[in-house]
Structure formats: structure tokens, C-alpha cells
Image (spheres, helix red, strand yellow):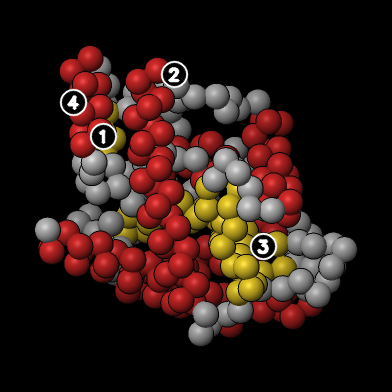
Amino acid sequence: MDVLLALLIALVTAVTASVPPVRGNEGVPIEVADRSDPVAGLPRILGDPARPLVVLDAGHGGHDPGATSPFGARREKDVTLAIATAIRDALAASGRVRVAMTREDDRYLILKDRYEIARKMRAALFISIHADAAPSNDGARGATIYTLSEVASDREAALLAEQQNQSDRIAGASLSGETGVDRILIDLAQRESMTVSAEFAALLKREASPYFPFRPEYHRFASLVVLKAPDVPSILFETGYLTNATDTAYIASAEGRRQIALGMKSAIETHFARKLVRVAAR
Ligand SMILES: [Zn+2]
């Protein structure tokens, strides 16, 4: 934590003593006023209360099917739920982290509620699961990891953000946030979360590459609403392409889900083991 952040926290703690505490990435309490609407009924958590919490978000759901594959008419909302469930089960069986899902059935959640669930549960990592589509290029295949940036890494990333964020505009959610000192604190926490998110993206590529293919440019940046929790490191994981026959056969199969869960489990457990080593070294 740098000196500027420490000073700002001291200042804001003094002037806003009544707001609830929010834990920073490194366990430092950061006071951020919570003016969002409460999320009714938080999901169940599996695992030992002493372990860090990972929140898995199965993309789309309910009236929002996401992309539909020309191969077997697979819907993204079903594929993402099955994959998220497989990852949850692998993590729960291993027991090294706690795990929860934003949805466990076919329901619609706006993007802001997805990350607010992670924030309210004090998640240490948020992973939104999706499946890609490139209708004009059925040769495109492989996984991609997105992390938050106001500047998209390319036109494709910008287009993805526009399409995904549309779902919140339709639902009428406010995307505007706090102002003044709250805004500064949130920006600082967000900057730290973005660094941890990028580290996790590199780790996921390394740990999961033996299990499934990534695109050559595997890490992309976009202004995705679902990644905007300021105090929870977050990634959006595109598992593969529903417009590619090979990818669809893989990501929509039990064996594909098993492999994805193994790669994700390895990355998540290594991520938190590293954090423990860093804390112990202080
Ligand atoms: Zn999607």
C-alpha cells in the first residue's frame, strides 16, 4: 500500500465514520460508502469459512440466452451454467477455497447485481464464465481472458463490451457511481484490483494451457460492467467459441467441462497459495 493511499484512507475514515467497511485486496479495510440497492438473498457458500471466497458467475440466463451455437443449438446460458457448476464442484471437492455461484439455475441477473453479490460476500476473486461467438469466422477458436480497462485492447474487445453492457442498459441499471473522495478511494481500490486481475489472467493461461487451447492473444482488455467491482479482482473468461464446431463439441461436453474445471482449479489454488507466501514473507 502506498503512502498516498494510506493518507486518503485516514482522511476518509475521519470524515465518513458511519459507512460500512469494505476489505481491500490485501486485507486492508477501505471505507467505501455503499449506495447500491441491496441484493436480495445472497447465494450459498460451500467450504471452510477460513478460506478465501471465489464467486463464479455463469454468464447470461433467463430471458437472455447469450450466443446460440449453430452446432446443436447450444445456448450460451446453459453452457456457462454447466461449466461454472463443474468448476464449483472441483473447487468444493478440493476444499482449498470457499466457492459460491451468482446463479445456480436459469435466471436473469443484471451485470451490476452479479458483481455486487461478490462484493457483499467479500469475495477474494470473481470469475464470470462466458462462451464466445464469431458468426463471420467459424475458424476462430480458443479461450480468451478479459480484464477491466476503460480503453479496449482492440475493436473486437470494444464490441464485446458494448454487447455485454447492453443488458444492463435495458434493465435500467445506473452505471454512474460516487463522486468526490469516495470516487478517489474507489479508483485506488480499482487500480489495485486491476493489477491482481491481470496477474491472475497470466496465471490462468499458464496453469490451464495443458488442459485447453487459448487464442494467441489470450489476454484482452475491455470496459465490461460485470468486472467493475472496485475491491474484488475480476476476470471474464471466454471458454471457447460456440461458432466453432471443435470448440462447441469440447466446451459443451462433460469431458470438456472436466478439463476446464481442472485448469481453473489449478490456477485459483496457485493464486491463493502465492498470496499466502507473500503475506508470510512480510
Ligand atoms: Zn456471453
Local SS, label 1: helix
Pointer 4: what residue?
Answer: 10
Q: Residue at x 57, y 28 (%)?
A: 175
The amino acid marked with disc number 2 is Thr
Of the two numbered discs 2 and 1 on the same chain, state the one appearing first in sequence.
1
Pointer 1: what residue?
Answer: 5
Q: Residues within 10 Å of mark 2 (few under 14, many from 20)?
A: few
The amino acid marked with disc number 3 is Ala
Q: Residue furthest front?
A: 3
For residue 18, say whether it is visible.
no
Residue 235 location (% of width, % of height): 50, 55
Between the residue at mark 4 and the residue at mark 2, the CA separation in whole angstroms equals 18 Å
Q: Residue furthest right?
A: 136
Local SS, label 4: helix
Q: Is residue 39 left or right of residue 247?
A: left
Mark identifier at residue 227: none
Of the two numbered discs 3 and 2 on the same chain, state the one appearing first in sequence.
3
Of the two numbered discs 4 and 2 on the same chain, state the one appearing first in sequence.
4
Mark identifier at residue 179: 2
Between the residue at mark 3 and the residue at mark 2, the CA separation in whole angstroms equals 35 Å
Q: Residues within 10 Å of mark 3 (few under 14, many from 20)?
A: many
Q: Residue at x 32, y 59 (%)?
A: 98
Pointer 3: what residue?
Answer: 131
Q: Is mark 1 within 8 Å of ligand 1?
A: no
Local SS, label 2: loop
Residue 110 location (% of width, % of height): 59, 38
240 is higher (above) or lower (below) than 124: below
